[in-house]
Image (cartoon, helix red, strand yellow):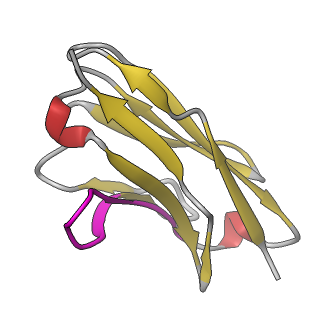
Amino acid sequence: QVQLVESGGGEVQPGESLRLSCRASGNAFNLYTAMWYRQAPGKEREWVASITRRGVTNYSDSVKGRFTISRDNENTVSLQMNSLKPEDTALYYCFSYTNWGQGTQVTVSS
């Protein structure tokens, strides 16, 4: 079973950047599509971005052009977040196959 651990969250001001990482333990992480989701207080969890095992990426309309998902190595997927907005504030989760991480908090506030 794959365990996922997110890191890189924090508090930044609007317009700044953060880079989230999702590190997997176990085997076969690079064989499955990896995704980032987020959940803001009082809202449902929403899909943010995904990357297939072949490197094909997709993004939600709300982050397209600002966020970039990538595979750093066979055990790590990252989410580069630029031009952050207050509405990006949420708990960000990594997901792959049937596995969820515990999340990393991103807060964008002036």
Q: Where's the C terminus, which quadrant?
A: top left
Is 60 placed above or below 105 here?
Answer: below
Left or right of 26? Residue 29 is left
- The residue positioned 20% from the left and 66% from the top of the image is 42
- The residue positioned 41% from the left and 38% from the top of the image is 106
Is 36 placed above or below 62 here?
Answer: below
Left or right of 21? Residue 48 is left
In the image shown, does 105 or 77 lie closer to the viewer? 105
Q: Which residue occupies the extreme right position in the image?
A: 26
Total numbered circles: 0
Where residue 12 appears, as percent x and y from the top left, is 36, 18
Q: Quadrant of residue 103?
A: bottom right
Left or right of 61? Residue 81 is right
Q: Does 76 lie within the magenta span?
A: no
Is 73 placed above or below 30 here?
Answer: above
Q: Where's the N terminus, which quadrant?
A: bottom right
Is 17 placed above or below 98 here?
Answer: above
In the image shown, does 71 or 61 lie closer to the viewer? 61
Left or right of 39? Residue 100 is right
Q: Does 46 lie within the magenta span?
A: yes
Q: Quadrant of residue 31?
A: bottom right
Where residue 66 appears, as percent x and y from the top left, is 24, 30
Q: Which residues are magenta?
A: 33-48
In the image shown, does 7 or 81 lie closer to the viewer? 7
Where residue 7 appears, as percent x and y from the top left, is 64, 40
Where residue 49 appears, as percent x and y from the top left, is 35, 55
- The residue positioned 77% from the left and 69% from the top of the image is 3
